[in-house]
Image (cartoon, rainbow, N blue to C red):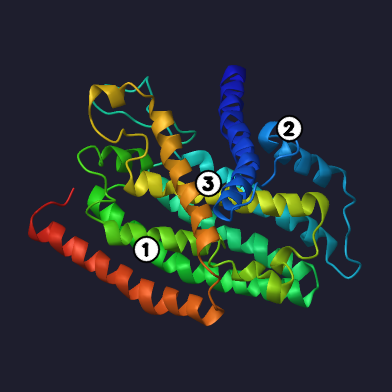
Amino acid sequence: MRLYIIGILARILGIIIPLLLGVAFLVLAERKVMASMQRRKGPNVVGLFGLLQPLADGFKLMIKEPILPSSANLFIFIMAPVITFMLSLIAWAVIPCAVNQLSTPTFDYGMVLSDLNVGILYLFAISSLGVYGIITAGWSSNSKYAFLGALRSAAQMVSYEVSIGLIIITVLICVGSCNFSEIVIAQKQIWFGIPLFPVFIMFFISCLAETNRAPFDLPEAEAELVAGYNVEYSSMGFALSFSGEYANMILMSLCTLLFLGGWLPILDIPIFQAIPGSIWFSIKVLFFLFVYIWVRAAFPRYRYDQLMRLGWKVFLPLSLARVVSVSGVLVAFDWLP
């Protein structure tokens, strides 16, 4: 029993520690990539090529004094960033990131903390709960700017969750399972990103809106709302909110699992098969993170009415039509799994 608990804790740390390091260096990567796109140098003072900048930023936030607004609801104010950050971590329990070498050779299941048969529903539920962390942060601050940012964020996330849900249903129809490992295995012949390319693009844009990233970063619009829902936060409260946002960015690279074959190689040839599945998974996730940063550097921010129109009047009908058309084709040609 003791060894079992130690094994579970080791697997949890094996997910959390790389994720926290990934979040730290994703911030640095974003600053460096955006700097090169804007013909600047970016952080280059702390350490070689600025590689220690995330550690310096983290240390600075840790030693800063936490300022608590006198009119805030203190318990909720303190817990809101913790909720945001914890939700972004526990969602990783069902994400398979490599081939499990102990599985049978006929059916490779992914290395995953908890291989749920309803893994995709679990992930969708956790991502929906992220709204609560943001709205409680805005409400408990007792600040007009923070509350406006929280309301914007809640409306935006709920709007785009509808289209994300319909797009996920499209993938589930093609697979016949809610298990992430089985979704990846179903893509051995062809990645879903090829036949479902329009759905793939809609899913990626919806993920940008769901994670409040540019050009949909309306909740944090510094020109209008100073900094959005986290305007009253300082030191570790701000750090946890910030880390939660970037951890959700990495999580939303689950486009990799749904559309780009997860840990499967690009081509089914011996040279590519020799590369471990975790390396392929990491390469695909890094590609998506690069595109996230690229979009931020390239596109201006949407107006709020444009954002909501895109979600309700464009993505919702298109994703619903795609569910009907894909299921119709599968039934007509008897391709249902």
SS type, badge 2: loop
Q: Residues within 10 Å of mark 1 (few under 14, many from 20)?
A: many
Mark positioned earlier in the residue sequence (2 or 3):
2
Q: CA distance from mark 2 to mark 3?
A: 25 Å
- Where residue 58 sits, quadrant-wise, is top right
Which quadrant holds the N terminus? top right
Q: Is 86 located above or below residue 140 in the figure?
A: above
Residue 243 shown left or right of residue 320 in the figure? right
Question: Cβ–Cβ below 8 Å for labels 2 and 3?
Answer: no
Q: Could you tell me the amino acid type at mark 1?
A: Met
Residue 219 shown left or right of residue 299 in the figure? right
Q: Which residue is mark 1?
A: 202
Question: Cβ–Cβ below 8 Å for labels 2 and 1?
Answer: no
Residue furthest to the top in view is 3
Mark positioned earlier in the residue sequence (2 or 1):
2
Q: CA distance from mark 3 to mark 1?
A: 18 Å
Q: Which residue is mark 3?
A: 250
Mark nearer the viewer, 2 or 1:
2
Q: Which residue is rendered at x = 26% and y = 45% of the image?
A: 191
How far across and how far down the image is residue 276, in percent?
39, 24
Q: Which residue is mark 2?
A: 47
Q: Could you tell me the amino acid type at mark 2?
A: Gly
How far across and how far down the image is residue 90, in percent?
57, 44
Q: Which residue is rendered at x = 53% and y = 53% of the image?
A: 293
- Where residue 211 sits, quadrant-wise, is bottom right
Residue furthest to the front in view is 39
Mark positioned earlier in the residue sequence (3 or 1):
1
Q: Could you tell me the amino acid type at mark 3?
A: Ile
